[in-house]
Image (cartoon, rainbow, N blue to C red):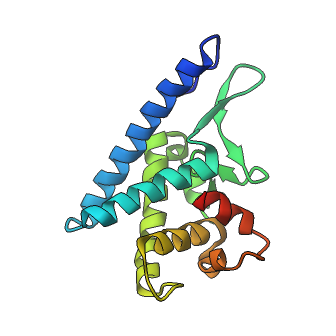
Amino acid sequence: MVFYPGEDDKGERKRYVKVMNEFITENSQQYMLRREPEVTNEAMGAWVLLVLTVAHQESYWTHYRMGEDSIFRLLRGDHYHGYGMMQVDDRWHKDFIRSQEVFDIESHLIYALDLLFSLRKKIIKKPCAAGKSLDQINRSIYSAYNGGWGSRCRWKNPGHKWAKNDKGFID
């Protein structure tokens, strides 16, 4: 699952997006069905949208990048603290980052799904908004995923220093 730029960038981009969309969607659906077999169609749709959106916001669905030396490497971001497609942070997830699983895109996604699902369970019990809409729950999950549990309601504050991240997520 690597994007190969070249003469046919448009065709390659279309192929890559299709493959990644299927990969993220299928893994997200299977994960949710294992964890919550009675999930409603509406909640499943919101979950898949959450995962697709987090992966896009964090990495544009990219796990590997080719270096200037033509060697593929794990995508790194956030001042080299974020790893891979879901930008798992080495400051909070040292054991995972030290493992070889971080390099495997499916293991990496499952690890991030565990994090997202754990946040989802907590946020459903303690939402930031009275309505508890799936959109509001997803916004809170992303804010917590991106900034820690204490940031779960930051999306409600357009003046927050990381409001651009939350706006990027919802856009």
Task: Please give the name of the residue rendered at 64% of the width and 10% of the height, measured from the top-left corner.
Answer: 7
- Relative to 66, say whether 75 is above or below: below
> Is 22 located above or below residue 45 in the figure?
above
Going by the image, does 110 lie left or right of 156? left
- As drawn, the residue found furthest toward the top would be 7
Q: In this orientation, does residue 91 appear?
A: no
Q: Is residue 43 above or below residue 124?
A: above
| Most foreground residue, 88 or 3 | 3
Which residue is found at the position 52% from the left and 70% from the top? 141
Give coordinates of residue 147: x percent, y percent.
Answer: 66, 70
Q: Residue 36 appears at what percent x and percent y? A: 26, 67
Q: Quadrant of residue 19?
A: top left
Residue farthest to the left?
38
Q: Residue at x 21, y 65 (%)?
A: 37
- The location of residue 24, given as percent across then percent down, is 42, 45
Query: Is residue 137 among the parts visible in the rendering?
Result: yes
Q: Residue 133, position in %: x, y?
A: 42, 76
- Left or right of 75? Residue 106 is left
User: Which residue lies at the image location 47% right of the left edge and 59% below the top edge?
Assistant: 50
For residue 8, above or below residue 171? above
How many numbered callouts? Answer: 0
Q: Quadrant of the C terminus?
A: bottom right
